[in-house]
Amino acid sequence: MSEAQEVPGTQRTAHDLTAFQHNILVILAEEPMYGLAIKRELEDYYGTEVNHGRLYPNLDDLVERGLVEKSELDKRTNQYELTDDGYGTVLGQLEWVFSKLITDDERAADVRDLVDAQA
């Protein structure tokens, strides 16, 4: 993963997270999920199996950093939800990527088209 720098005007940085952790945050930006649902989303993205031994330590790290909140759905199932800081981290990363990607009006239009397609 490339190192993301702090975006001017934001307090949140993403430079010390792995790409895998960033992907977890992006998945949780959609809605709160339990661990196996996150695992399935990651497997769809990567096209390969994601081991529990990789997923849950990364989720725990994101919880410790205050980017994800963990709650108990039942005695066996935890739910994970993006915190405000986690959301800010995702936005900060996007802002940094856009600052590098958008170099002219044509590229800006391409990004607007992508955003409009999601709305």
Image: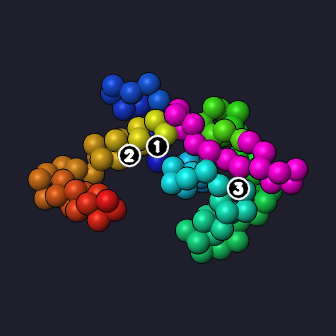
Q: Residue at x 44, y 25 (%)?
A: 11
Q: Quadrant of residue 64?
A: top right
As helix, strand or loop, the secondary structure at mark 2 comes to helix
Of 103 and 45, the residue lying toward us = 45
Query: How many neighbours does mark 2 have within 10 angstroms: few (below 14), some (14-19), or many (20 or more)?
Result: some
Q: Measured from the top left, where is residue 109 in percent x and y? A: 16, 58
Looking at marks 1 and 3 on the same chain, the residue that comes earlier in the sequence is marked by 3
Task: Say if mark 3 contacts mark 2, CB within 8 Å.
Answer: no
Q: Quadrant of residue 37?
A: bottom right
The numbered dot on residue 94 is 2
Q: Amino acid at mark 3?
A: Tyr
| Residues at marks 1 and 3, CA–CA distance in whole angstroms | 19 Å
Task: Say if mark 1 contacts mark 3, CB within 8 Å.
Answer: no
In this image, 53 relative to 22: left or right?
A: right
Q: Residue at x 11, y 53 (%)?
A: 105
Task: Say if mark 1 contacts mark 2, CB within 8 Å.
Answer: yes
Q: Quadrant of the C terminus?
A: bottom left
Q: Tell me the residue that label 3 is attached to.
A: 34
Q: Tell me the residue that label 1 is attached to.
A: 90
As helix, strand or loop, the secondary structure at mark 3 comes to strand
Q: Which residues are magenta?
A: 71-86
